[in-house]
Amino acid sequence: MAAADELDESIFRYVWRHSRPQQVWLFLVLLVSLPFLYLTLELPKRIVNGPIQGDWAPGQTETLFEISVPMPGFLGGGNLAMFDGVELDRLGVLVWLSLIFLFFVIVNGLFKFYLSNYKGRLGERLLRRLRYQLVDLVLRFPNARFKQVRGPEISSMIKDETEPVGGFGGSAFADPALLLSQAGTGLVFIFLQNFWLGAVAGGIVLFQLILIPQMRRRLVTLARARQLTARLLSGRIGEIVESIPSIRTNDTSNWERAELGSRLGRILSIRYDFFRWKFFVNFVNNLLAQITPFIFYLVGGYLVIAGRLDIGQLVAVIAAYKELPGPLKELIAWDQFRVDVQSKYAQIREQFVMGHLISPDVQKLSYETPARIEREIAVSGLRIADDSGNDLLEPTSLRLAPGEAIAASGPIGGGAEYLAEAMVRLAEAASGRISIDGHALDSLPDAFAGRRIAYATSGLYFPQMSIRDALVYGLRHAPLVEAGSGDAAAEARRREAKVSGNSDLDVSGDWIDYEAAGIAGPHELRERLAQVLDIADFRIDVARLGLRNRVPAGLAEETAVHMLEARARFRERLAEGGDAVYFESFDPLRYSDYATVLENIVFGIALPEAAEEMPLVARPQMVAVLREGGLDDLLHEMGRQIAETLIEIFGDLSPDNPLMDNVDLMSPEEVDGYKAALRRVSADGSASERARDRRAFQQLAFGYIEPRHRLGLLDDDIRAAVLAARARLLERMDPGLAGAVSVHSPGAINPAASFQDNILFGRIVDRYAEASARINEVLVATLRETGLSETVFEIGLDFDVGSGAKRLSSGQQQKLALARALLKRADLLVLNRPLSSLDGDGQRETIVRVLASRAALGIERQIIFWVLSHAEHAELFDRRLEFKDGRMIADLTNARSHDGAPARHDADARMTERQRTT
């Protein structure tokens, strides 16, 4: 890992240090471009004074392109003719001078194009470097720092506030040099034409350069205030998102709205002041820029009339000055940009540069396998305090031997959890130390601590990733096999990363440390994952997620064939076991009583993502199919009767009444809307209201299932109309409708259906109480017999847990964290109340499995330190520690002495007794 360099105090010093060669190259290209810029100013004067307004006699010619070299005096002096030039008449001179002017304009434009692209690339590289450095610094923050900052604010600073800082990198030196050279070239040209006109232009330019930056200082102050308030707003919005449970359970949403409105009001006031002052400065700047042409026209015109200045010179002066406001305006804007960027850079530096950063050497990349813990872990007088100096854990000493399983119990805040955090370097010692085999834990690199120590706790955060990635995250220490080795594109990306000061490690390579997991390679990984998930009691949950998840997009053809075979075998098993009565298969020619009306019409699944664009019932193809057979009227009437019945039965109940849970066709929030729609049935409403009510009633009918809802509304005529509409729909399926519906097929896999539904290809007849259990048994047996149970498990491993693992329950998140810690096969396993969401029996069973798993995982000498949620579980361990009020009050073994009392470890017991006496 490339360590991030320190951030310089000055943005100029930072840019120069990281882009010195590129900045020098920009200067050289800029110098080469200046003569071409001057020629674009000189040629218009020659064109006007020469072929356009010059005195040309009939037949007169002029020599162009003559080339001669002046000779020194000792060689006789004079000029040595290299090329005699070309004789041209008046029209020829006009054409050739115009073409030369066009050529230099194009060359000048190409210079600008090259410089702009080069500066843009340079700025983007510096932005990439800066962002990488800031993230690197975040990874090196001391633990206490994370208690003082909010994630959204840090994210906003790295993502948004660095944008202008990085953009400034390409223009820090080149832009002022370019703009000054362009303005200087124009001024020099004006001076050469007429001194007094040049003096006027120079004076006004100097006045602009002094006045406008001073006026813009206030903009810097306002911009800084705007930046700070926007950053705080970002953090506050993040807090609102994370506090939704508290907001909704305390009725504080209106307070949050008022508080947010107050913040937005302050931001509006600052932004309004900023833009008002900005436009005033622009007004003054533009006014000064327009005064100079007025003077040129007045004074320059007088000089032309007086014969002291020819018209070509005046035209050239005015043309040259027209080129001045652009560079001057940009130069003033650059100065404002510079002050603003320096201010933002200073604020960023204040937040990221601090003392006590973790040394880059601690996080240095290592391909070596660290030594194992062979002797003991010693805790010597360890004391942990909060930011105010109050003791969280009073001086504590103990020793942990390889192979020991130690339980720590006590109330929350009693001290055990702080000791656990200290053992994995998440809590800093105020005094004392922890040593492993004689080496201080704080001095050991992450390559040792991160591979020989595993940790799990309740509330551990998981970023958005699959279950598989979450499990192997603890094994990704270094790229063991790099992807794209020898690939030109990969090499180019690696070179670009080095130039930008980023890590050149290939993230797409294989980073998984199979040896740490106790396996030979990728082919054994799935089995190891299944083993640790079994220990954590999470494997069945993963299989369920796989069954209920959509079929993967890249499903192998062989797997699809096995799924179709399993579908057929499932039906054979139903017949063999006499369970066919519990299941209803899909049939293209038959109405499925246990599927919804909509599912029967489309004979498939309406895709939710397509419904967001346009509801299926509103699509022209669907409307036409329903209207042809009169099904739209039937569904409208059915939906109206459903609404009448449900409102008659449940309409007077409050939304939170438990009986409303039985109403799945209509949500409590929709009751009032349907009441209003029913009132409009007998009244005259607008055409738009009638169309909206019609779609609403049809939507109710679409979700109707006769055996479940039992309103007696589905007769044979409606069934026949649905089947007829199905036939028309499938016959006329066009690309637009095919993108909104995924149709079932007896001989194919439906990619929009879950794995389970693709095997079943039908619905459970749920009027039998035992139907679900019997069908599940047959399904599980079928999957095992056809070898698809492993495929289901693989699909479950690919399940996306969502940001913060919010798609998993709290218990599942804790099981996932435990399984990840077990997969590392670490020498020290620290578990800090890892299963607090489970009941006591569930925790006890998991503890038994974890303690017994060390032999199966090949880590018999592993030390387990488990902070318990239930003190009675301590009897399962070799040794138990008791904590209270920040002190360790007991260190007991579970071996029994002659009198039946727990025996103490002598040394630790004496230490405990001394502490207790003190």
Image (cartoon, rainbow, N blue to C red):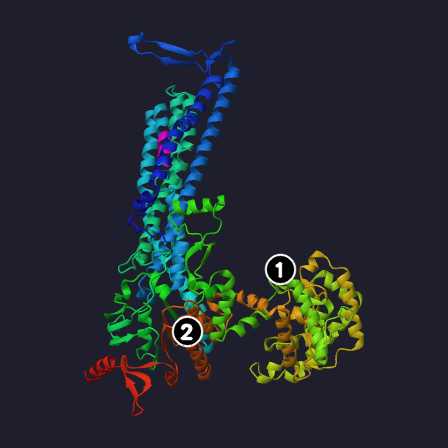
Q: Quadrant where the C terminus lies?
A: bottom left
Left/right of residue 546 with respect to residue 894 in the rendered view? right
Whether residue 385 can be seen here: no
Tell which of 532 and 249 is nearer to you: 532
184 in magenta: yes
Residue where numbered disc 2 is placed:
854
Q: Earlier in the sequence, mark 1 or mark 2?
A: 1
| Up/down of 333 relative to 404, above or below | above
The image shows residue 331 at horizontal and vertical percentages of 37, 40
Question: Dot 2, how many residues are within 10 Å of its Cα: few (below 14), some (14-19), or many (20+)?
Answer: some
Residue sitting at x 32%, y 57%: 352
Helix, strand or loop at label 2? It is helix
Whether residue 248 can be seen here: yes
Left/right of residue 892 with respect to residue 40 in the rendered view? left
Residue where numbered disc 1 is placed:
556
Amino acid beneath label 2: Arg
Tell which of 561 and 261 is nearer to you: 561
Residue sitting at x 47%, y 54%: 509
Q: Are marks 1 and 2 in contact (CB under 8 Å)?
A: no
The image shows residue 238 at horizontal and vertical percentages of 43, 65
Count of marks overlaid on the render: 2
The image shows residue 525 at horizontal and vertical percentages of 49, 64
- Is the magenta region chiefly helix, strand or loop? helix
Residue sitting at x 36%, y 46%: 337
Amino acid beneath label 1: Ala
Segment tinted magenta in the rendering: 178-186
